[in-house]
Image: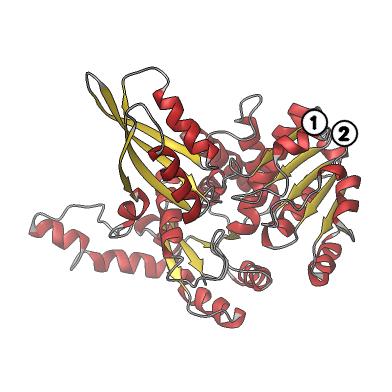
Amino acid sequence: MIDRNIIRALVVETPSVPGNLGKVATAIGMAGADIGEIETVQVGTTSTLRNITVHCENEEQLKEVLKAIRGLKGGIRLHAVSDDVLRAHEGGKIQMKSRLDVRSLADLRRVYTPGVADVCRVIQKDPEKARLYTGIGNSVAIVTDGTAILGLGDIGPVAGMPVMEGKAVLFDRFAGISGIPILLSTRDPDEMVRTVKNIASGFGGILLEDIGSPHCFEVEERLKRELDIPVMHDDQHGTAVVTLAAVISACKSAGVNLKEAVVGQIGLGAAGMAICRMFMAYGVRQVLGADKSDVAKERLAEYGGEPVGTLQEITERSDILIATTGVPGLIKEEWIRKGQVILALSNPKPEIEPETALRAGAAYAADGRAVNNVLGFPGIFRGVLNARVPKITHEMLMAAAEAIAESTKEGELVPHPLNPRVHELVAQAVETVAQKKKS
């Protein structure tokens, strides 16, 4: 998920007078933008120079931010506006590197010819040895057709490559897994399935990423059925895992019994449908769903959920309401019931602002800024690769969600995504369930 579409680093100088940094922060906030990192670059005798990262919805909002800062009095100066995001992506974010150094002929003979032939023969006799003597068992293909790139839509696989590289970086950073982007220049499910099956022998798992609905359902279901390595569509199941974790935490804060509650899901695309299935697998008493697509509602009914006709009805009937539509302001304040838990997860603007929902009587309300899939997919794949199981099951996904929820501090929705301990706990929980399935 993404908080803002435009990210810029502003170099701002403020005289060394208390309150000047606050004036800058207020100006940014009043323009409707978010502040990311604030880095002190230089502290002088009379002034301080800082890099302030701002997140804006669009170029117009960025212009408003710059105008507001430039309009500040008292010697506050905007020196430069730089795009750190583009600079960080120059040359790509990943590369293939050797784990072994080659400095002598003896090294060369061990890693390549003639020594490598012995390893090939070992694997030929016992293909399972490839997990031990090659990187296959620690590699995951990150596969996309570019039809549903995070918050941007159908922009194609090449334009979506920075997202795939980002996933690879996170795999490496939090799980020690080699993520390899695979860009598919086809949207035909038959061709997509055939292509992935043809390359699957070189990987320990397949992560489907940013593939649009409805063909994402067919592609994932067929690959899970026809491959003997773990397959997961992150937009479906990764989102569902982190959402379940967030709802578990929210229910603790609000004093709501999740399994006895009625959960309503607005939006039955890839993420919404997976969220419904996850809650049903978790044992929630009743799961309602609303969507403008009759096909989506029929699919929900097939899975055991209850389609609902109107947004007002699903809002009024639900104890816990989740929305993943991408439509800001979709949920009306007057529909909210007292004591509800509301998670409006669309970014950059939620279906209802948390403050509005709380004012209307909700016991707990949050938007999607904290609900980040990075909390799920690295640890999930680390766990299944360690266990060497061929499938990712709902039991494993629920274990991941519970591990995330247990790592969440009181009063928070989910833990910090950069906490390495969270990813370790997710991996351990998934591996434990996977090992039980094997025995």
* Residue 395 position (above or below residue 121): above
Q: Residue at x 59, y 40 (%)?
A: 370
User: Which quadrant holds residue 353?
Assistant: top right
Kindly tell me whether residue 138 is visible in this rendering: no
In the picture as drawn, the residue positioned furthest to the left comes out as 104
From the viewer's perspective, is 85 left or right of 403? left
Provide the residue designation for mark 2.
338
Q: Which mark is residue 107?
A: none
* Residue 92 position (above or below residue 47): below
Q: Position of residue 124 (x, y in %)?
A: 38, 70
From the viewer's perspective, is 50 left or right of 138? left
Q: Nearer the viewer, residue 272 or 21?
A: 21
Q: Nearer the viewer, residue 355 or 435?
A: 355
Label 2: state its secondary structure: loop
* Residue 240 position (above or below residue 408): below
Q: Residue at x 91, y 52 (%)?
A: 313
User: Which quadrant holds residue 183?
Assistant: bottom left
Q: Position of residue 214 (x, y in %)?
A: 69, 71
Gap in angstroms between the C-alphas marked 2 and 1: 7 Å
* Residue 29 position (above or below residue 204): above
Q: Residue at x 35, y 18 (%)?
A: 17
Q: Could you tell me the amino acid type at mark 2?
A: Lys
Q: Nearer the viewer, residue 267 or 189?
A: 267
Q: How is the image coloured?
A: secondary structure
Label 1: state its secondary structure: loop
Provide the residue designation for mark 1.
363
Q: Earlier in the sequence, mark 2 or mark 1?
A: 2
Q: Residue at x 65, y 47 (%)?
A: 241
Q: Position of residue 318 (x, y in %)?
A: 87, 45
The answer to whether marks 2 and 1 mark residues whose Cβ atoms lie closer than 8 Å is yes
Q: How many marks?
A: 2
Q: Could you tell me the amino acid type at mark 1?
A: Ala
